[in-house]
Image (cartoon, rainbow, N blue to C red):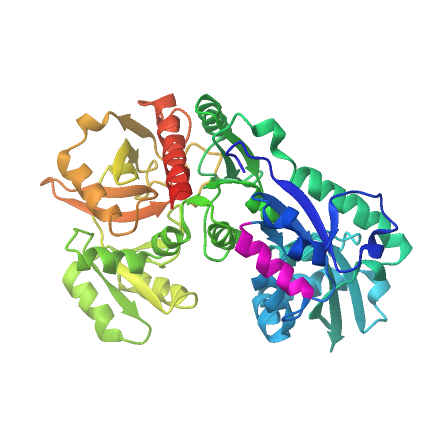
Amino acid sequence: MGDSKSSQLLIILDDLDKWNPYFPTDQVISAKDYLFSHQYLDLKHANIINLCFDSGYMSLGHYCSMIAEARGHKIMPSIKTMNDLQKSSFYLGDLDFLKEKVNKSLSQISELDQKESFTALSVFGKSEDKGIDSISKSIFRFFPAPLLEIRFKKHEHIWSISALKVVSLDSLPKEQEDFFANTIDHFSNHLWRTPANRKKYVCDLAILVTKDEPLPPSDEKALQKFEKACKKLDVFSERIYEDDFARISEFDALFVRTTTSIENFTYNFVKNAEMDGLVVIDDSDSILRCTNKIYVSNKLEKKGISTIPGKFIVKDLEEEKELAIKKYGFPLICKIPDGSFSIGVKKADNREELDKILSEMFQKSSLVLVQKFLRSAFDWRIGVLDNQPIFACKYYMSQGHWQIYNHSKGINTKMFSGKSETLPLYEVPKSVIKLAISSTSTIGNGLYGVDIKEDEEGNVYVVEINDNPNIDSDIEDKIEKDVLYETIVRSFLNRVRESRTV
């Protein structure tokens, strides 16, 4: 969309009479016209809302979405969403994570106390009922469909989602017609708006952030510097948020600047962006690999890359634990595979502490990584992008603590984290740079932050590889300043240009 070619918004209906209650527009067309008219066959750029009621296999609605994808048009719902919504066994399993939220939300609505079932309308992920609006948005993130009826049922005082059903536009009661009209107007103007104001830009970059995140990967000043770099390089940039899931297809690229996790919304957000053909940093493979310390440790070990000596411990295998104690001695570092900002990392100074820590960790993970404790005043952090170093920092341990972050202290206190020192790349030992590059090459070519320890003999070890590393003002950018931000934006530009030639 950012290649100076405007995209037309079209709304497809199986019966044009269904649009009679709404303002006339030439953007509303019939399914048959879309499928057979040369006007749309030859249309190169289009964003399409498919409101055909019958979306079953081999229906007109189904064919419209299928043909739209084949023509390279942006379509909602996609064939995948249509197919998934045909079988409750597909979508109910994916929505299992909403169980607690659904029951808690509906249990607080007094009007439902005496009811055993309840239905709510979802229009582009929005609901008139504020009590379930967040549920509607969560469902929309997984199944982006314009009009859905969400059906709830209560069994033994527990509310749950029983079904999702596609809704026909002409079945809406009059009191919901205004809600639909206002919502689709907002959707078409702000979600898939005509990019006339972007024509001078080379590409469109979405920067995914979370409002009021306690430990964001980039602070406000850094985000502004990214936006400044985008403007300088003719890249349109806009911050988007968790609720903007359906806006993914509006952009050419996605830059994740909120803490990533397999369990939160970010991984699904990235996967869908990739399915829509966006260039994404960091990509889903990098997130999946970097968030799991056991994967990274195995990968590096297989490649012969130096890591902190350690081994995996499985619950109830006492001989493995004894072997770790004998081989590395105390203190020992215990790590849950999935964790960031040193969360899920504990130090055991003796056997009693080790048993307690392992017992707690095994409740969350079937494997725990146990490593030798290497004392150091600081960890190196080498930023790597496109398999090249882009910044180097020393992160010092927090005062009186053995980690960079001391989670027993408040985030806003001076004791929470240690100081940092940024150095020119030429001042960093070559062994550190070489280790950082060789380690990230086993993961991908995204944006990584490699933590490295250096012992008294000058030996270097990878601590971990982080996707989505911190880039904060006056820390990581202290040496390169604006050039650092421009380097990252240029990487997006190069990747987008390359994707257009494939």
Tell me which secondary structure the magenta stretch mostly adopts: helix
Q: Look at 24% across and 48% down and name the residue there.
A: 441
Q: Position of residue 147 (x, y in %)?
A: 73, 58
How many labels, in total?
A: 0
Up-down: is 162 above or below 198?
below
* Residue most extreme to the front: 38
Q: Judge from the rendering whether residue 204 lies leftward or rightward of residue 407; answer left or right.
A: right
Seen from the viewer's position, the closer of residues 144 and 450 is 144
Magenta stretch, residue numbers: 60-72
Q: Quadrant of the N terminus?
A: top right
Q: Position of residue 131 (x, y in %)?
A: 76, 55
Res. 142 in view: no
Q: Position of residue 376 (x, y in %)?
A: 22, 41
Task: Verify whether residue 12 appears in magenta.
Answer: no
Seen from the viewer's position, the closer of residues 152 and 200 is 200
Q: Judge from the rendering whether residue 366 lies leftward or rightward of residue 224; answer left or right.
A: left
Q: Look at 32% across and 56% down and name the residue there.
A: 293
Q: Look at 51% across and 53% down and name the residue there.
A: 272
